[in-house]
Image (cartoon, helix red, strand yellow):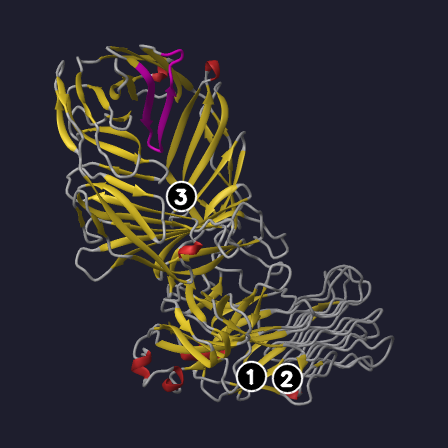
């Protein structure tokens, strides 16, 4: 992965119709929130912050003291919620939650964003509850208030001790505001042990005048009784029964719910407040992880009266086969559960079996109509090394999601076999540091959840699928997480803990293809995905052992190589706009030694892009944490192919079948990218621009001369191209001070197929003990006219006290100077394409587009103009030979001097040499001065332009 700039990544990506933009799959480009948290004289035990970004990502972190600092993704705005735990007398605690209405932006280019929670004025609310006709199990009191900027909520819960108790009290701390609403609820135990909930009426207090006292007295009405027997007798031994009751919504009993355990075949007596309830019996089966519930009965309890409700349901047996296929089988399961729901009752009751025996769940059920509600599979199998550390698969059926099954008494019936075809996908979690030289940031607790809705073609019948996986708590800089799921398109939620803060990654959509049979044999070709938007084909020269192969499109993965560009997932590509790279995770159970992977993709943009696209593979076996590698093209095929040139080469009968449409703007294009690999793991289609340096044909050129023949590039396709040129640096004869850096200029040019560009890459000047040559300019020329020229930097002779002058982004070369601090004695740079001047015995001028730089007598040559060959000026006499760099750099000899930089117009010579001027006729121009390259030599890059 290298020491490159990185942000939190995820390893899945959707390759929807897309363009290309700068690769940025960051989930965390670290920004910082900081601030103070205090509550007057109240003692703060701990607090945590919960943040939601405007794009839906969540982050939270717990703190034990103030001030706080929290790492989040830069470039987002966040809504803040703070929850504090405050100490009360006697070791008790209360809680205060503050939710801010505004969104707070964070930008690591600006600095930390400060958000304080400082409340110097606090007040206690002392609450008490007294009950008659019963005792208190617990009380919970809540205070709420709001201001124009935030909402506030305080609460406290108390469990009376010793018990039983008829009175309980709680204290909570609240920000001192004029109107605070206090409510709560009390759990009350009746004389025979039934627990009921009582709502506490709202009261309003004014805390601006100090602490407030509130109290409630709850007088329980005369209860009624619900009695009966539970005599369900399934063939399996009963562990126990429970009689469950729940108040009816919209009535006075709405908050009441509870249960009473009853021995097998025993009786029960519930003491309930008057009103309506739904009651049902639950039966737990011994040693089978199973329970079932009867249908619910609506009863009305009257004060002082006793109502009988017996549960004597006849039971039957329902079998539910389960079959796991695909890359896994039933043998890979650690646990499995099936939840059934009763279909013939307005109040839904359930049955659960957590034991899968011989591929089947066997339910003992009260007679009635049942349907499947949820299937849960757990692959956390510590004895199976092939299983991931933690992975679950869930299907949740909505009403009508599966056909109902009538279960008669004393009979055995069967549901249809529940078949789940499962595949695996590996997601890679990564962190992108703010700066390339920063140490890699570790993460832990990485997890991913996939969700989708599946419609099976029957009107009204669908289910929700969910797959969850975690990577463990080991701290890593790159964390793989293996997800097991059914094929389909999912919404991804992913997160991890970084620097103590939990952060959700940018999610997105991921598509998991159906597993494809991969037989043993020679020249085996499979197509796991075959759609107009996307086709993935894998060809194996030899498969020694057959198996299954699957492909997943992912929005997250290991950080892609620095400087490359990737398809945007939203199709809105733009220069300088970062977007998520697209990843393909290919996995197989087949055995092979080599494979050719071809990806055909539709995207928005000019088809000239295909020239720059390459297929990359993340080799996880490269120490220490794996690395991306560019895959070679298959024999006889290009690495990337524009499908409009020959649709049949891309598997289409014509352009329409491929989805190509040149009538719209931007056009819809289709490319095919192929590569040969020896292993599977994430793949990515990335754009690799052409880079021209001072090395040609394996020979590194330095000094005043370059390649023997002019360098050229032939345009492969008509389209828009962004060309960037950087001039070379001037040399320096002063320890600790550098010669001038080159200028960097960039523009977009519309070029026609077979146009030829002439390229000259500037070379760094030569330094001697006392003298230093100027750097050469970098030139891009078409048909004898300059498109782009980046000026080279000026040389720096001994005795100078300031750095050399950088190449200029204006068309004129900058002046040199005879003064050690560049304060006087200026020697003019060239203008209008001419060379720079010289000062006698202070070095030669740099060459321009059309005019040579001035030579310094017999000491050294001025740099040669591009139209005169572009050679650097040669040093002639007086000390070592301080040649100017190829590209028109002036010689530094003079007797001792600094040569001017080459460029569109040359820089002036001097003790401090001037930089060359630049030229740019492209659209969407960009430019900067002081652009030093690592080698000091110039560079030219060509890449596809993006809208």
Q: Which residues are magenta?
A: 136-163
Spatial distance from mark 2 to mark 1, Cα to Cα?
10 Å
Tell me the distance, in whole angstroms, between the alpha carbons under discs 3 and 2: 57 Å
Quadrant location, the N terminus:
bottom right
Which x, y percent locates residue 764? 71, 74
Q: Residue at x 62, y 66 (%)?
A: 931
Q: Identify the secondary structure beneath mark 1.
A: strand
Mark 3 lies on a secondary structure that is strand
Residue 905: tell me if it is visible: no
List x then y, in percent, for residue 719.
43, 80
Residue 927: x, y in percent? Answer: 55, 67
Residue 815 seen: yes
Q: Which mark is residue 866?
A: 2
Type of secondary structure dominating the magenta stretch: strand
Q: Are marks 3 and 1 in contact (CB under 8 Å)?
A: no
Residue 246 badge: none
Marked residue nearer the N-terminal end (3 or 1):
3
Q: Is residue 454 left or right of residue 327?
A: left
Q: Residue at x 32, y 85 (%)?
A: 654
Q: Which mark's residue is nearer the viewer, 3 or 1?
A: 3
Using the numbered discs, state the Cα–Cα distance from disc 3 to disc 1 in whole angstroms. Answer: 51 Å
Crowding at mark 1 (Cα within 10 Å: few <14, some 14-19, many 20+): some
């Amino acid at each position: 992965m290298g020491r490159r700039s990185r942000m939190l990544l995820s390893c899945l990506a959707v390759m929807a119709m897309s363009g290309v933009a700068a690769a940025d799959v960051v989930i965390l480009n670290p920004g910082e929130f900081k601030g103070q948290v205090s509550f007057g004289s109240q003692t703060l035990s701990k607090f945590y912050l919960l943040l939601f970004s405007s794009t839906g990502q969540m982050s939270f972190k717990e703190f034990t003291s103030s001030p706080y600092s929290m790492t989040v993704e830069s470039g987002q705005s966040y809504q803040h919620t703070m929850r504090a735990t405050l100490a009360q007398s006697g070791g008790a605690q209360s809680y205060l939650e503050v939710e801010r209405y505004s969104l707070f932006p964070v930008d690591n280019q600006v600095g930390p964003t400060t958000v304080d929670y400082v409340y110097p004025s606090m007040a206690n609310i002392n609450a008490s509850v007294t009950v008659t006709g019963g005792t208190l199990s617990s009380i919970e009191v809540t205070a709420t208030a709001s201001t124009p900027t935030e909402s506030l909520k305080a609460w406290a819960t108390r469990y009376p001790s010793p018990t039983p108790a008829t009175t309980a009290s709680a204290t909570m701390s609240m920000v001192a505001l004029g109107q605070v609403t206090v409510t709560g609820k009390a759990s009350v135990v009746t004389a025979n042990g039934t627990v009921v909930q009582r709502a506490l009426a709202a009261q309003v207090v004014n805390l601006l005048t100090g602490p407030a006292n509130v109290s409630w007295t709850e007088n329980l009405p005369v209860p009624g009784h619900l009695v009966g027997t539970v005599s369900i007798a399934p063939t399996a031994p009963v562990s126990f029964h429970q009689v469950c009751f729940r108040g009816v919504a919209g009535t006075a009993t709405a908050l009441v719910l509870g249960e009473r355990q009853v021995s097998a075949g025993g009786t029960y007596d519930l003491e309930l407040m008057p009103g309506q309830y739904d009651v049902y019996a639950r039966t737990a089966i011994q040693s089978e992880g199973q329970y079932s519930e009867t249908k619910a009965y609506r009863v009305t309890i009257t004060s002082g009266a006793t109502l009988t409700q017996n549960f004597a349901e006849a039971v039957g047996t329902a079998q539910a086969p389960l079959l796991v296929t695909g890359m896994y089988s039933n043998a890979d399961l650690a646990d499995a559960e099936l939840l059934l729901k009763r279909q013939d009752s307005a109040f839904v009751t359930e049955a659960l079996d957590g034991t899968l025996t011989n591929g089947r769940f066997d339910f003992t059920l009260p007679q009635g109509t049942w349907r499947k509600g949820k299937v849960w599979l757990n692959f956390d199998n510590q004895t199976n090394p092939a299983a991931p550390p933690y992975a679950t698969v869930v299907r949740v059926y909505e009403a009508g999601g599966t056909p109902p099954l009538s279960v008669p008494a004393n009979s055995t019936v069967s549901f249809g076999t529940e078949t789940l075809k499962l595949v695996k996908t590996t997601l890679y979690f990564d962190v992108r540091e703010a700066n390339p030289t920063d140490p890699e940031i570790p993460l832990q607790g990485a997890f991913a959840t996939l969700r989708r809705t599946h419609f099976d073609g029957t009107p009204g019948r669908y289910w929700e699928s969910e797959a969850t996986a975690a990577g463990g708590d080991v701290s890593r800089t790159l964390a793989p997480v293996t997800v097991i799921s059914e094929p389909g398109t999912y919404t991804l939620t992913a997160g991890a803990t970084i620097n103590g803060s939990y952060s959700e990654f940018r999610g997105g959509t991921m598509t998991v293809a159906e597993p494809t049979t991969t037989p043993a044999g020679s020249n085996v070709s499979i197509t796991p995905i075959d759609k107009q938007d996307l086709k993935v084909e894998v060809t194996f020269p030899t498969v020694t052992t057959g198996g299954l192969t699957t492909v997943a499109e992912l929005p997250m993965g290991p950080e892609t190589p620095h400087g490359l560009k990737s398809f945007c997932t939203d199709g809105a590509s733009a220069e300088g706009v970062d977007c998520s790279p697209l990843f393909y995770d290919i996995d197989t159970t087949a055995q092979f030694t080599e494979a050719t992977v071809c990806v055909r993709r539709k995207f928005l943009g000019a088809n000239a892009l295909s020239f720059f696209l390459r297929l990359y593979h993340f080799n996880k076996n490269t120490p220490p944490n794996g690395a991306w590698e560019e895959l070679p093209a298959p024999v006889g095929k290009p690495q990337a192919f524009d499908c409009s040139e020959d649709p049949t080469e891309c598997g289409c009968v014509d352009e329409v079948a491929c989805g190509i449409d040149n009538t719209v703007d931007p056009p819809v294009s289709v490319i095919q990218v192929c590569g040969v690999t020896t292993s599977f793991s994430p793949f990515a289609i990335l754009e690799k621009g052409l880079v021209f340096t001072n090395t040609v044909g394996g020979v590194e050129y330095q000094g005043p001369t370059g390649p023997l023949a002019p360098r050229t590039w032939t345009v492969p396709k008509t389209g828009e191209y962004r060309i960037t040129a950087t001039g070379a640096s001037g040399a320096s004869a002063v320890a600790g001070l550098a010669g001038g850096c080159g200028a960097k200029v960039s523009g977009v040019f519309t070029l026609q197929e077979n146009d030829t560009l002439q390229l000259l890459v500037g070379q760094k000047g030569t330094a001697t003990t006392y003298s230093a040559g100027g750097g050469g300019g970098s030139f891009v020329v078409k048909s004898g006219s300059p498109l782009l020229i980046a000026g080279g930097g000026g040389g720096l002779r001994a005795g100078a006290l300031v750095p050399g002058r950088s190449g200029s982004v204006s068309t004129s070369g900058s002046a040199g100077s005879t003064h050690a601090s560049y304060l006087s004695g200026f020697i003019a740079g060239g203008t209008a394409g001419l060379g720079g001047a010289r000062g006698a015995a202070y070095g030669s001028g740099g060459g321009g587009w059309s005019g040579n730089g001035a030579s310094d007598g017999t000491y050294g040559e001025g740099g040669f103009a591009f139209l005169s060959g572009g050679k650097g000026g040669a040093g002639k006499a007086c000390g070592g030979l301080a040649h100017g760099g190829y590209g028109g750099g002036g010689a530094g000899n003079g007797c001792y001097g600094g040569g001017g930089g080459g460029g569109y117009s040359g820089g002036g010579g001097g003790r401090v040499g001037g930089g060359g001027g630049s030229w740019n006729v492209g659209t969407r121009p960009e430019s900067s001065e002081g652009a030093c390259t690592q080698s000091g030599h110039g560079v030219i890059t060509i890449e596809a332009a993006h809208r």
